[in-house]
């Protein structure tokens, strides 16, 4: 990831001793693709700016930290009773905030990436310590979470609706946590598992 030794870093979040539970990872970009978007990260104005662009092009990289947000009862998505979209369909309302664990994790991200880049010999490191707004990573999941208890979950452990036994959800809605990873491979893995289960149910005439 480090590659060239002139680096600029942005961390989309906020020390190791502070982290509590769960984990995080970094996603990065680098090279020419960082321009011109990250040019504003380069110091200077006029000639100094041009000179710095020449100096750093195309050796910039950016790193973004993605951490797992703990599932909590108070964090939820509901159908908004008042607001409708342009087609008259009620929009979703998100009740969701970062709390102690997420803030500590974010701080650990920032400290860790700074340590890595410094060890790699980066010349110009900029850390953005404030987390981006909740939902920024656009991995919304869990609107019909799975569980054994129909009173607190929508599907069973195989993504089958508790209330309608011949309906299975093969998407991100049964997830009970987003983990830290991008969602698609996990969705595919869960879908595969669901289909295996369904096939077995059909074979044994339970579905
Ligand atoms: C900009 C962006 C970039 C992303 N990048 C990545 C990435 O790089 N890697 C990664 O792993 N993930 C990425 N994600 C996340 C990933 O795309 C989603 O987590 C994933 O698509 C969720 O899949 P899903 O099937 O649960 O929901 P969706 O893909 O949202 O599918 C829901 C479907 O239901 C349909 N629908 C909704 N309401 C109704 C209705 N009333 N009647 C009929 N149909 C309806 C919608 O039209 C849609 O087709 C990204 C997401 C976004 C928005």
Image (spheres, grey):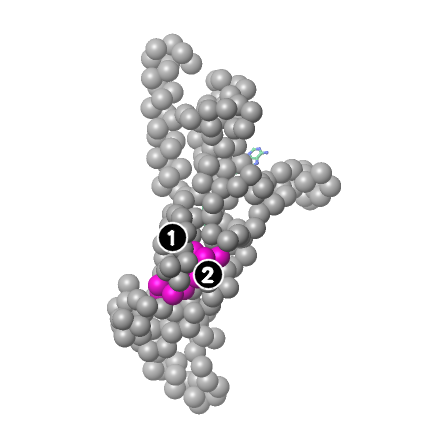
Residue at the spot x=56%, y=39% of the render?
Answer: 73
Q: Is mark 2 within 8 Å of ligand 1?
A: no
Q: Quadrant of residue 206?
A: top left
Q: Which residues are magenta?
A: 103-113
Q: Residue furthest bottom?
A: 47
Can residue 11 be seen from the camera position used here? yes
Q: Is the N terminus in the top left, top right, bottom left or bottom right quadrant?
A: bottom left
Q: Position of residue 95 (x, y in %)?
A: 61, 45
Sequence-wise first label, 1 or 2: 2
Q: Position of residue 201 (x, y in %)?
A: 37, 15
User: What is the chief secondary structure element of the magenta stretch?
Assistant: helix
Give yes or no for residue 111 being in the magenta stretch. yes
Give the alpha-carbon distance from disc 1 to disc 2, as whole Å: 11 Å
Q: Secondary structure at mark 1?
A: strand
Name the disc covering residue 13, or none. 2
Q: Nearer the viewer, residue 74 or 78?
A: 74
* Mark 1 lies on residue: 24
Q: Is the C terminus in the top left, top right, bottom left or bottom right quadrant?
A: top left
Characterize the local packing of mark 2: few (<14), some (14-19) or many (20 or more) Cα atoms within 10 angstroms.
Answer: many
Residue at the spot x=40%, y=55% of the render?
Answer: 19
Q: Quadrant of residue 78?
A: top right
Q: Nearer the viewer, residue 206 or 177?
A: 177
**Left or right placement of residue 164 versus residue 182 in this view:** right
């Amino acid at each position: 990831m480090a590659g060239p030794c002139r680096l600029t870093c942005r961390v989309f979040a906020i020390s190791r001793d502070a982290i509590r539970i769960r984990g995080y990872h970094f996603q990065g970009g680098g090279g020419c693709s960082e321009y011109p978007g990250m040019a504003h990260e380069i110091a200077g104005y006029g000639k100094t700016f041009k000179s710095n662009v020449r100096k750093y092009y195309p050796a910039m990289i950016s790193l973004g930290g993605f951490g797992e947000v703990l599932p909590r009862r108070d964090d939820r998505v509901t159908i908004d009773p008042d607001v409708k979209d342009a087609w008259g369909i009620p929009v979703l309302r998100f009740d969701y905030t970062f709390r102690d664990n997420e803030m500590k994790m974010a701080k650990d991200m920032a400290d860790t990436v700074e340590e890595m880049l410094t060890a790699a010999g980066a010349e110009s490191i900029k850390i953005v310590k404030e987390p981006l707004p909740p939902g920024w990573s656009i991995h919304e999941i869990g609107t019909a979470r799975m569980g054994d208890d129909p009173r607190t979950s929508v599907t069973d452990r195989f993504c089958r609706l508790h209330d309608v036994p011949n309906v299975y959800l093969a998407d991100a809605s049964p997830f009970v946590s987003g983990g830290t990873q991008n969602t698609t491979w996990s969705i595919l893995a869960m879908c595969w598992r669901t289909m295996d289960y369904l096939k077995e149910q059909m074979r044994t005439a339970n579905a």
